[in-house]
Amino acid sequence: MGHANPLSAEKDVLVDANIFFAIGHPTNPQYARFRSAVRNAGVVVKLPQRVIGELGGSDTERVRTAIDEGWAEIIDVPAPTDGDAVAASDIAMRTIAAETDQPEHEVEKTDAILAGLVVQYVRDRSTRGVIVLTDDQPAREGIKNAVTAQGYTDAISVYGLADIIGDDPGDSMRLI
Amino acid sequence: MDFEQVTMTADDRVRPDGGIDALDPPPTDIMDEETLEPKALAQNAPKLEIVMQLLNQPALTRVYVYVCYWGPVSPPEIMDALELSKSTAYEYVDRLVDFGLVDRDESTRPQQLTAEPLIIVEQYAPIVITPTVLHALALQEVDDDIDYFLDRYGTGKLIAALRGAGLHFAGKTTQRMVATDIDVRETEAMMIIYALQPALAVGREHDPFFEYLFPDVADQMELPDLDGADGAPAKSEPHE
């Protein structure tokens, strides 16, 4: 419907848990749209263990459903130790602090660490490319800046939910 | 002597902006002889009682918000949109009319109902109640996530989450930061932020006091577009 789906089977897709909250319960039309975008691209989205763990586990219904249906999996990505990866997290943290008008120590580690995880993932697995999905605008900016600064713009791209399933027309939302 | 009564817990100090802060006592001169006139106090009392009723009865509040946002509407429209039985719809309308919150125009058939938006701002508490806030509370009637959150954390934290959700959709905070600010689990913050989206999307269009809650980011939020049906709420999904 007008928008090109940036997902492709050529690339690994790393997903922040908030995407699974943005699409709602498995009965939600948004959830169905996301699922078909992922399936149509021939992708199994990857949820970093670290993200899932910090969120309280994979038993949230919407995450569980995706794993059981075979279009999501949990992957174990090591904490960033590589110089580039650590630097990426730092850049993300500074960006998020600036975007949210908060001091750097107020930035949640998990928000910033995603940038480092992705850079580390690209280095360790030398894949053809990684797509990162997160529904947090400041976090997205943080990853973009980190990726650009560290010279990974060709290997890593960052999107939000609307880029995958289009803008929510609101027709699927129960208003009151 | 009961010391418990004066002990403030951190929960009492959660501010609508999500921060937790000790409250400055209000200056003594905000109350004067005029505001303390028994006559003035007597006039304010019914309003306070009405707000208490709304806060405690989400099903009733849901009808009020519907009439306030989409009025003039008729009782059958309320029944359809909110999936209420005829007797329940009329019972709620009657009570809202008795409270003086809803106006009933019986010169037409069917009767047409309208409601004035309500606003309460108390900077020293701090409390802000607008139709958007009432809408958020009323959503517990139809949204399990909001029902769970209210059950676990109460009204004050829901209002804090509402403010946090608005900041999130304006790109001014991350969901994990909201979780820390209002002291809930990260999954709970993510869940409630999306559950509150309807209150924000509708409030931005219909709540004349929306900017009291979001003076800084009212026009920056990325929210679903509602211009589907002209002013009429989208019908809920059909029952399975």
Image (cartoon, rainbow, N blue to C red):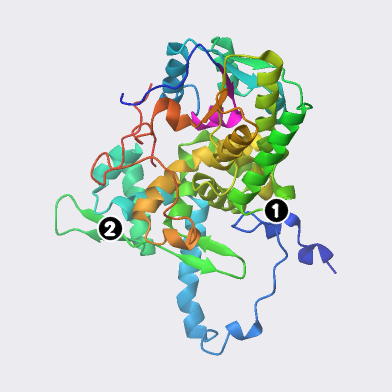
For label 1, the SS is loop
Q: Position of residue A158 (x, y in %)?
A: 54, 30
Q: Position of residue A146 (x, y in %)?
A: 63, 36
The amino acid beneath tag 2 is Thr
In the picture, the disc for residue A91 is none
In front of the other: A155 or A171: A155
Q: Is residue B42 visible?
A: yes
Q: Residue furthest bottom?
A: B33
Q: Nearer the viewer, mark 2 or mark 1?
A: 1
List the single residue furthest toward the right: B1
- Label 2 and label 1 in one chain: no
Q: Nearer the viewer, residue B193 or A81?
A: A81
The quadrant of the image that shows the C terminus of chain B is top left
Query: Which chain is mark 2 on?
Result: B
- Percent from the top left, x then y, of residue B185? 68, 38
Question: Which residue is identified by label 2?
Answer: B114
Residue plotted at (46% across, 23% down): A31
Report the magenta residues as a range: A12-23
Residue B124 at x, y percent in the picture: 61, 70
Q: Is B16 situated above or below B188?
A: below
Distance of label 2 from label 1 (alpha carbons): 47 Å
Residue B161, relative to residue B1: is it above or below?
A: above
Give the residue at x 47% y 19%: A7
Instruction: Say if the magenta span includes residue B30.
Output: no
Q: Residues within 10 Å of mark 1 (few under 14, many from 20)?
A: few
- Spot the residue most to the left: B108
Q: Which residue is mark 1?
A: A103
Quick check: B97 left or right of A63?
Answer: left
Q: Amino acid at mark 1?
A: Pro
Count of residue discs: 2
